[in-house]
């Protein structure tokens, strides 16, 4: 006889869980008690949104579901931001929610929420476990659902009395991973299509990649002389200094790259959905019938033909597809071989940051510096805002597993993601980027980094405004500023108040020594860059945007 709380922990252990992220609550005390005797590491966070984003980062970097526990009502609703990110980004995650006791349901009891209704549109599967004897069944199924096809978040509601009840239950067994592989007929058709192509292009995206798959993709690009782009915030899928890399297919795309994709006769889309952001509002490929011959490779059959009608639809995970297609070789040297070199040259030109701009701090030299001093396996995280343009456009990723950023454009992600990344990979450098508005949405998780001695470095780019919204505001309603100004704390002093290391950068030359002091401190650190709000994008000022509106 075991309690529901014990059975939950045993099922997690059986499925290889090594850590959970949580904010404690009385609704799942039985689980917390069972964790006391478990080897699973429990990381307590300061807000449920941050905890869910940490779980998302773990799922994003490992391909295994990140695990998050929160309490009912406000705990669960706070966590919804992380669930939405995981859903839109196709990241495996399992959220466990303590629920009101069974006898109190449907009475609007204390902190009661119907989670099937609340999470129904932003989770892959939502379930409530009423019988503790079925915990092994439901938890194992949750791992299978979260990782199969198009990965995503699963939400499990746990009534309080169910967790304390004692039952006999079968021993929990690990879930069986589901792999989808391409058929030989589809591979033959793709080989024939490429053999007759004149201007092919490859776009990499989505999840279910790994280091071996990235190596297979590199070999395919070299063998077939293919220009390769990575979709929005998936830049870690291809080495940016490889001669076949053409750039990122996302917000603010290089116009030359956009034109190259539009003029392609074959587009091979591997792993991604090519949603609104990477498709430039569905203009790179017309929906529903692209001008280009589209070969869409995706692990979930439901995504094939959902937005674009593909010429060839291949229901396979990215890893399985590239492993299979890497064995295919072109009969003759492709006629487009020189095009990959031209695409890469255009990327190198586009990704060279400007060295000047308004104000005393220039972000271009700072990104250049980081590109030189950070190791190739450094992990960079960020949330959302105009500041992220500097990272995505100008920092050159070299290896898989070095980027954690929400394609959903959610603010507040960078700091909790950095905490999770450093917990997972303590020997690797982890740098989070955040705007001043972005940081203060989940900046309290810096305390979590201090509590667990995780020396992340958070670069807070402080321009005193919600930059992206101000940019749009000045373009659409010039000089009618409202609701976009911010009055901020001293972020370096805030870091010290938490028990970390703090630095303030007011001139470009201050950054390198400040960053090195932060790194040498061995503590979680905040490096605050005080950026002129006029430096709203790498190429345009707020005044220029206002004057051209």
Image (tube, rainbow, N blue to C red):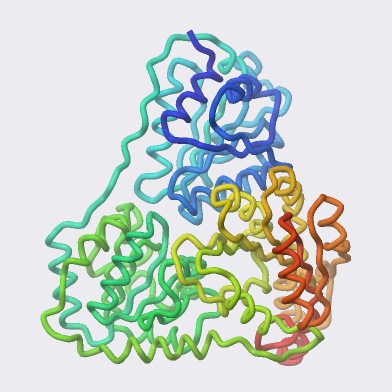
Left or right: 33 as drawn, with respect to 506: left
Q: Residue furthest front?
A: 520
Residue 442 pos. (x, y %): 72, 52
Q: Residue at x 60, y 15 (%)?
A: 161
Left or right: 290 as drawn, with respect to 165: left
Residue 58 pos. (x, y %): 53, 48
Residue 232 pos. (x, y %): 50, 69
Indicate whether 333 appears above or below 127.
below
Q: Quadrant of residue 192?
A: bottom left
- Which of these two is toward me, 191 or 446? 446
Left or right: 268 as drawn, with respect to 277: left
Indicate whether 44 appears above or below 446.
above
Residue 116 pos. (x, y %): 54, 34
Left or right: 22 as drawn, with respect to 304: right
Q: Residue at x 67, y 47 (%)?
A: 50
Q: Quadrant of residue 21?
A: top right
- Which of these two is toward me, 543 or 519? 519
Indicate whether 489 appears above or below 372.
above
């Amino acid at each position: 006889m075991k309690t529901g709380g014990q059975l939950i922990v045993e099922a997690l252990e059986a499925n290889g869980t090594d850590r959970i992220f949580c904010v404690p609550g009385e609704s799942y005390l039985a689980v917390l008690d069972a964790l006391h005797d478990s080897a699973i590491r429990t990381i307590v966070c300061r807000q449920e949104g941050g905890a869910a984003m940490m779980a998302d980062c773990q799922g994003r970097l490992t391909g295994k579901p990140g695990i998050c526990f929160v309490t009912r009502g406000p705990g669960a609703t706070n966590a919804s931001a992380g669930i939405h990110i995981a859903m839109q980004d196709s990241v495996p995650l399992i959220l466990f929610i303590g629920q009101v006791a069974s006898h109190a349901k449907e009475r609007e009891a204390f902190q009661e929420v119907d989670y099937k209704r609340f999470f129904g549109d932003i989770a892959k599967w939502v379930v409530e476990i009423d019988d503790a004897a079925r915990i092994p069944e439901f938890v194992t199924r949750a791992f299978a659902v979260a990782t199969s096809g198009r990965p995503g978040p699963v939400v499990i509601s746990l009534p309080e009395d169910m967790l304390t009840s004692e039952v006999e239950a079968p021993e929990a067994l690990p879930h069986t991973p589901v792999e989808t592989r391409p058929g030989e007929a589809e591979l033959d058709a793709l080989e024939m299509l490429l053999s007759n192509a004149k201007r092919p292009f490859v776009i990499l995206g989505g999840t279910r990649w790994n280091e071996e798959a990235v190596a297979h993709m590199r070999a395919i690009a070299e063998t077939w002389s293919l220009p390769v782009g990575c979709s929005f915030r998936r830049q870690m899928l291809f080495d940016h200094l490889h001669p076949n890399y053409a750039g990122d297919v996302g917000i603010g795309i290089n116009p030359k790259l956009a034109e190259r994709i539009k003029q392609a006769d074959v587009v091979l889309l591997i792993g991604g959905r090519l949603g609104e952001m990477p498709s430039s509002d569905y203009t790179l490929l017309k929906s529903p019938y692209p001008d280009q011959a589209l070969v869409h490779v995706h692990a979930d059959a439901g995504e094939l033909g959902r937005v674009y009608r593909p010429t060839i639809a291949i229901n396979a995970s990215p890893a399985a597809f590239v492993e299979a297609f890497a064995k295919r070789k072109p009969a003759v040297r492709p006629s487009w071989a020189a095009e990959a070199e031209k695409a890469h040259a255009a990327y190198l030109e586009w990704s060279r940051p400007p060295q000047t701009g308004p104000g005393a701090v220039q972000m271009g030299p700072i990104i250049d510096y980081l590109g030189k001093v950070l190791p190739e396996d450094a992990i960079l995280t960020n949330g959302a805002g105009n500041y992220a343009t500097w990272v995505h456009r100008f920092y050159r990723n070299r290896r898989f597993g070095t980027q954690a950023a929400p394609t959903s454009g959610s603010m507040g992600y960078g700091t909790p993601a950095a905490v999770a990344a450093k917990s997972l990979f303590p020997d690797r450098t982890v740098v989070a980027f955040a705007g001043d508005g972005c940081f203060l949405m989940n900046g309290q998780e810096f305390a979590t980094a201090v509590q667990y001695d995780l020396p992340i470095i958070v670069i807070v780019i402080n321009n005193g405004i919600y930059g992206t919204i101000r940019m749009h505001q000045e373009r659409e309603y010039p000089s009618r500023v409202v609701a976009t100004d911010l009055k901020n704390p001293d972020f370096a002093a805030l870091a010290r108040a938490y028990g970390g290391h703090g630095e303030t950068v007011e001139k470009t030359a201050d950054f390198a020594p400040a960053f090195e002091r932060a790194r040498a401190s061995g503590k979680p650190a905040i490096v605050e860059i005080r950026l002129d709000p006029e430096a709203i994008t790498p190429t345009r000022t707020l005044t220029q945007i206002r004057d051209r509106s």
